[in-house]
Image (tube, grey):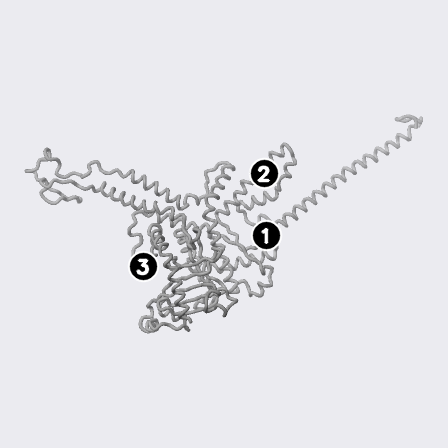
Amino acid sequence: MADDNAKELCRREERLFDKKANLDALNQEIALNFRPQRADFTVERALGEEFALDLMDSEPIRCCRELGDARAAMLRPGGREWFRAKLNDQQMNGDPAIKGLLDQMNEIARTAIYDPSTGFVRAEKEADHDMVTFGNAVKSVETTIDRKGRRHMLERTWHQRDCAWLDDETGVRQDFMARRFKASARHIKKQFPKAELHSSIVRALDKTPDQEFKLCHVMMLAEEYEGYKDQHPKQPWVSLYYDSEHKMMLSERPSERFRYIVDRWETIPGSQYGYSPAAMTALPDGRGIQTMARVLLEAGEKALDPPLKASRKGITGEIRTGAAQITWIDGTGYDERVMGPAIEPLFPDGFKPALGIDLINRTTLALRDTWYLTKLTLPTQAKTAYETAQLVEEFIRANIPLFEPWEAGMAVLLDEIFAVLIEMHAFGHPLELARSPLSGRDLVFAFQNPLQDAIEKNKVNQAQQALGIVAGAMQIDPNAAHAVDAVKIVRSAVQGTGAPADWTPDEDVTGQKIAAAQQGAGIVNALNTAGQAADVVNTGAEAAAKLQQVRQGANDGSGAYGPV
């Protein structure tokens, strides 16, 4: 049955790869112009073959490289907590116990991610450039055991040429992945020690152990695979390795996870493959600038070393154009006054490359704009708070097309990484997690990047404008201060400046301080009121005593207000 399954998988694999042949040809053309080191979609390169041999201008390659590097700096800025797992329920996030658990999980995840053995930095670097160039990045997150017997996470990025996938019914995630690869005979034996190997692989183990053979890895739904249809109902996926050349199954294992993450920039309805809007838009200019650069280089060469026109009768020997070289002219039978110069430039007026330079400069600016490089820097030419606010909003609008799909892809990757860490018991035993307040709740991820920083910093400008309006209105009506929550405005503005988190205490602590301050103000007001009342009482008592003295009258029986 294993061989029959391998044959059916091979047929399905061939259909998928044949269907994407035109896409591979397009990606080959894109790579030749913007990322030549990845231009092996339709050709097999020899080791040491020179990249970009036919290119005359490096600006398209630089633009593509800069956007790929910028993607890493934007999504994963160094030295910062660029992601944070939390719950959907903001009220629960504020609970000290839950906050402590989330902080602990985030710290464990960051430590695991940046462990050199995981390959995270290398894999994400490759994925960044694949994403901006081709619009797709295929990654896998697995667990592996190193030579010291330690189990750790492993992330890898795969060449899109070798991968073909299918989306599920929603079109959001994938439910089938076929990945082609080559493995040496000795590695096949080490990875699949119990598998029945083809005789050619067995012979290679003895004579040429480094000889490579074509294999394929397939991840698919277990319910769709005949071999595991009823045997493992609790495992949603099945992982299959088979020998593509000889159509023999090597490994069949159930899996709790799909393992592959397909990051896509933009997609076309009806297609499971993404594309790069930057590369697709820049492709005409990328081709054109190479032609212009070639023509301009030829024009410059001709201007510096122009082609010559010579008279066969006037030259006695070979024309020599090198330094300190002499070309002899027949001085007896050739008259330059009658027949013209014996040697002269073919184009006496020379070449004027200014037009070509202008065209290249124009194309360079267009390429940088097409690759979003002109939109990645926050504008700084504003002078007033209003101008700054408008420029920040423009920066946000220009960069949302970049950040939205990229952040969504990073959220999927982090979700898979956290699942692997839970599987490895990195956050504790599953039973402990089941008894924790996080049990049964989904994690979501918040990101810190230049776009989020701009959004937060824009709150400072908004706060200044809002408080300025309130201050102006209070000149007319003091009750205008009650129209806004000044404490929330100040709190958001301080956080938007990027101030340390401990500068703004929790809202509960702030509320307690405000309540205490209000209570203290109430006591002071009460004491002031009581003091005023005491003054009134004292004044009244003194007046009554004086009145009593008056009523007692003088010795003659008279009084100030008449007879006593």
Indicate which disc residue 467 carries: 2
Indicate the quadrant where residue 86 lies: bottom right
Can the viewer see residue 73? Answer: yes
302 to the left or right of 148: left
* Secondary structure under the numbered disc 1 in the rendered image: helix
Point out which mark residue 324 bears. Answer: none
Q: CA distance from mark 1 to mark 3?
A: 53 Å
| Up-down relation of residue 199 to residue 342 (above or below) | below
Badge 3 marks a residue whose secondary structure is loop
Counting other residues with Cα less than 10 Å from the Cα at mark 3, is it few (<14), some (14-19), or many (20 or more)? few
- The residue indicated by pointer 1 is 90
Q: Is residue 563 above or below residue 298?
A: above
Query: What crowding class fits label 1: few (fewer than 14 Cα within 10 Å), some (14-19), or many (20 or more)?
Result: few
Q: In percent of the image, x 44 and y 44: which residue is there?
A: 377
Q: Quadrant of the N terminus?
A: bottom left
Instruction: State the separation of the CA atoms marked 2 and 3.
Output: 65 Å
Is the residue 364 above or below the residue 234 in the image? above
- Image location (x, y in percent) of residue 205: 34, 72
Residue on which disc 3 sits: 44
Residue 363 percent coordinates (x, y)? 34, 42
> What residue is drawn where x is 32% and y is 39%?
358
Amino acid type, mark 3: Glu
Q: In this view of the protein, which residue sits in the foreground, 261 or 69? A: 261
- How far across and down, in percent of the image, does residue 310 sit? 13, 40
The three-letter amino acid code for the residue at tag 2 is: Leu
Quick one: 267 or 213, which is closer to the camera?
267
Residue 191 in view in this figure? no
Between 316 and 196, which is closer to the camera in this rendering?
196
Tag in front: 1 or 3: 3
Label 2 neighbourhood size at 10 Å, few (<14), some (14-19), many (20+)? some
First-in-chain label (1 vs 3): 3
- The extreme right residue here reads 556
